[in-house]
Amino acid sequence: MKILNIVKYLFTAIGLIFFIISFTMYQSNTTFLKNAVKTQGEVIEIIRNKTKKSNGEVSISTYPVVSFKDKVGKIITFTSSTGSSSSNYFVKQKIEVVYSPDNPEQAKINDFSSLWTGIVIFVILGTLFFIFGLSILIFMYSKAKTKKHLLSNGEKIETEFIKVDVNQFISVNNKNPYVIFTQWLNPKTSEIHIFKSDDIWFDPTNYINDNKILVLIDKDNPKKYHVDTSFLPKVVN
């Protein structure tokens, strides 16, 4: 649970940071375009950067080098900051350029990819991180609320211990938590209910001395439950 507490705040914070970065970039871009001068430029070179991946494969990114004349006739050359795996440009291609009248070296190709790709990436990343962090927040809040309700109003039932198992879906520093499984035959419906405890970060097998384990259930919905593991020793951090 402590790991989830860290993750939920970390991912939500990263998401917010990415949103702030994307908003700042958007504001900067719109201000730049509002005052920018448009002119025609020409692609004079295509730069290819090779990057070796961890699996040994080599990826190639291409960046067009563009030349244009500013309003006083000075020739300005710049390399686009946006690259792609396959170049959409070719040498001697005529393209539209936007540049700052006060600082002509601050120039960009006037297309969506060059102007907005970075912002879109940060928005997507921010959305993914924020939604993931927020989902954990909502999940943990709902779980804590249900547990609090069950501890105060839940019906106590004795269940039969089944087994201790490893939760393979969670791993922290190559360590998986354990969970306790129990079962209970509902006398009203003759249905067998299987209950699973919260994650336990040590093997509880040797501390389960009784075949009966207490579980708190919602009287109206046994699917809402809390396995009482208060009999286990506390872990000292």
Image (spheres, grey):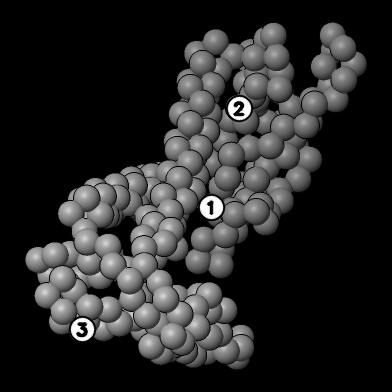
In the rendered structure, which amino acid carries the disc numbered 3? Ile
> Pointer 3: what residue?
75
> Pointer 2: what residue?
226
> Is any atom of residue 64 visible in this view?
no
In the rendered structure, which amino acid carries the disc numbered 2? His
Q: Quadrant of the C terminus?
A: bottom left
Rendering quarter of residue 229: top right
| Relative image position of residue 2 (x, y in whole percent) | 42, 47
Q: Residues within 10 Å of mark 2 (few under 14, many from 20)?
A: many
> Is residue 212 shown above or below 101?
above
Distance from the alpha carbon under mark 3 to that under mark 1: 66 Å
In the picture provided, is 219 more to the left or to the right than 102? right
229 vs 220, nearest the viewer: 220
> Is any atom of residue 58 visible in this view?
yes
> Pointer 1: what residue?
201
Circle 3 sits in a helix, a strand or a loop, which is it? strand
Q: Residue at x 71, y 51 (%)?
A: 165
| Relative image position of residue 158 (x, y in whole percent) | 71, 23
